Amino acid sequence: MLFFFNCTHNKQQEQEKNHLNHTQKAEPELAENWWQIAGVPDIGEYNHDKMEPVDFAIWQAADGTWQLVSCIRYCGKEADFRVLHRWEGKTLTSTNWEPKGIFMVADSTLGEEHGWIQAPYVVKKDGKFKFYYGGGGQICMAESTDGKIFERIINADGKTSLFRSEEYDRARDIMIMNYKDTYFGYYTGSVSYSWPDSTKGAVFCRKSADLKNWGEEIKVSETEEDVVAFLSSECPQVIHKNGKFFLFKTQEYKPGFQRTTIFCSDDPLDFGVNTDELKLKTIPVAAPEIINHENKYYVAALMPDLKGIRITELSWKEDQQL
């Protein structure tokens, strides 16, 4: 009987291991039918030949139109300024959305770093659109009822900051996932002891019940990759699908070398720290945002030459096995 129990137990363990391995083989796949929705905009006095649309947010406004707000970097007279610019599309699959002008500029009177605003993300809750953005090493927020005109939320201290990084520095690139009535705010933090040889970059997370008050900082992903570590965990995106959590994080922006690594985990707070065990694959895109619309997934990402933003469809290989 003992022999039979051990054999049965070992067989069950092997089946469970094989099932886990098979489950983790399910991989997100990008379609090849990319369509461009935005290019380099005309931003008037801030125009510069080096300008590039980078980190962005896409959402559907109250009137059904689609909104895109992107950080425009390398603008201004010295190419050291950043602004947020907005576009509008009639549908998600429309091409060449209409430019709507400068959306927001950093406000130093509210504690935001002069000339440094970036990486927005939008969440809709209770009829309000909550617009999160990087205000120079801190995460800030604005609100809207129509999803187009936003007002900054100013704290009792007269500042817009919701939180900063704790372990590292330069909190930025926030995105938010709702899971079991809890909001998980994922963001990038990094530190440079000497550039570029001694740097660190990681993805962190804080949880919230109300999208305003955020809990303790938790490091959820930090790996050693063949890139500048300061930039190794940019633009995190986390989605929950059929019991698994997928983390997308960009590790290279440079044209011809764009790279985003995907990790798969059972735990939304653990995608591997000092390990690559949960790594699934690498895809040749930068700054992706995952969009779920009408039960279909899409990925928006930067153009390969960093001169615009594009979208394609996203599917899961062996999806039925998840």
Image: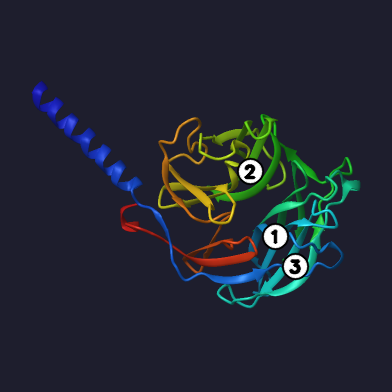
Give the quarter of the image for residue 99.
bottom right
* Of the two numbered discs 3 and 2 in the rendering, the one whose residue sits closer to the viewer: 2
Residue at horizontal 63%, vertical 41%? Answer: 188
Q: Secondary structure at mark 3?
A: loop
Residue 318, compared with residue 165, is above or below; it is below
In the image, which disc is placed on residue 52?
Answer: 1
Is disc 3 in contact with disc 1, using a CB cutoff of under 8 Å?
A: no
In the displayed structure image, the side of residue 237 where residue 43 appears, left or right: right
The residues bearing labels 3 and 2 have C-alpha atoms spaced at a distance of 24 Å
Residue at horizontal 65%, vertical 64%? Answer: 307
Q: Earlier in the sequence, mark 3 or mark 1?
A: 1
Q: Earlier in the sequence, mark 2 or mark 1?
A: 1
Residue at horizontal 31%, vertical 53%? Answer: 321
**For the view shown, which residue lies furthest in the right direction?**
109
Q: Mark 2 belongs to which amino acid?
A: Tyr
Q: Secondary structure at mark 2?
A: strand
Q: Which residue is tagged 2?
A: 187
Q: Position of residue 74 (x, y in %)?
A: 76, 55
